[in-house]
Image (cartoon, rainbow, N blue to C red):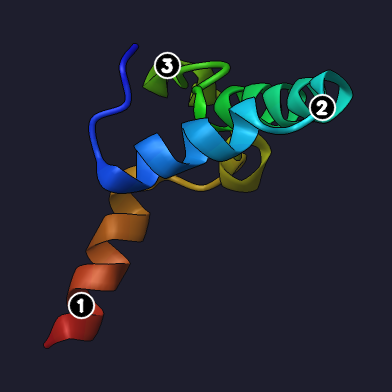
Amino acid sequence: MKPTTVIEKKLVEEIKNLPIPQQKKILEVVRLLKVGIEVKHKSNITELRGCGKKIWLGIDAQEYVNKLREEWN
């Protein structure tokens, strides 16, 4: 990939002038930054199925909704 902006060109030139060990350190830092930006796992809404299930044990959903609707009046 060719540097396109002035800043990118300056960075490339600066890095080229560094000793190889320092260039490798910079490469590792950039690699770690890239890994941090990538999404490791896309969440799926179906993974939430059953969460909070115990909270609603013994509660009738329709009665609960009706009670909430009464509070609106």
Q: From the image, state whether disc 1 or disc 3 is nearer to you.
A: 3
Seen from the viewer's position, the closer of residues 11 and 45 is: 11
Numbered mark located on residue 70 in the image:
1
How many numbered dots are placed on residues in this image? 3
Q: Relative to residue 48, is residue 61 depicted above or below?
A: below
- The residue carrying pointer 2 sits among few (fewer than 14), some (14 to 19) or many (20 or more) residues within 10 Å by Cα, namely few
Q: Quadrant of the N terminus?
A: top left
Amino acid type at circle 3 is Thr
* Residue at which label 2 appears: 19
Residue at x 51%, y 34% (from the top left corner): 13
Could you tell me which secondary element the residue under label 3 belongs to? helix
Amino acid type at circle 1 is Glu
Farthest residue toward the bottom?
Answer: 73
Mark 2 to mark 3: distance in Å? 51 Å
* Residue at which label 3 appears: 46
Between disc 2 and disc 3, whose residue precedes? 2
Seen from the viewer's position, the closer of residues 26 and 71 is: 26
Seen from the viewer's position, the closer of residues 18 and 22 is: 18
Could you tell me which secondary element the residue under label 1 belongs to? helix
Mark 1 to mark 3: distance in Å? 32 Å
Q: Relative to residue 50, is residue 55 depicted above or below?
A: below
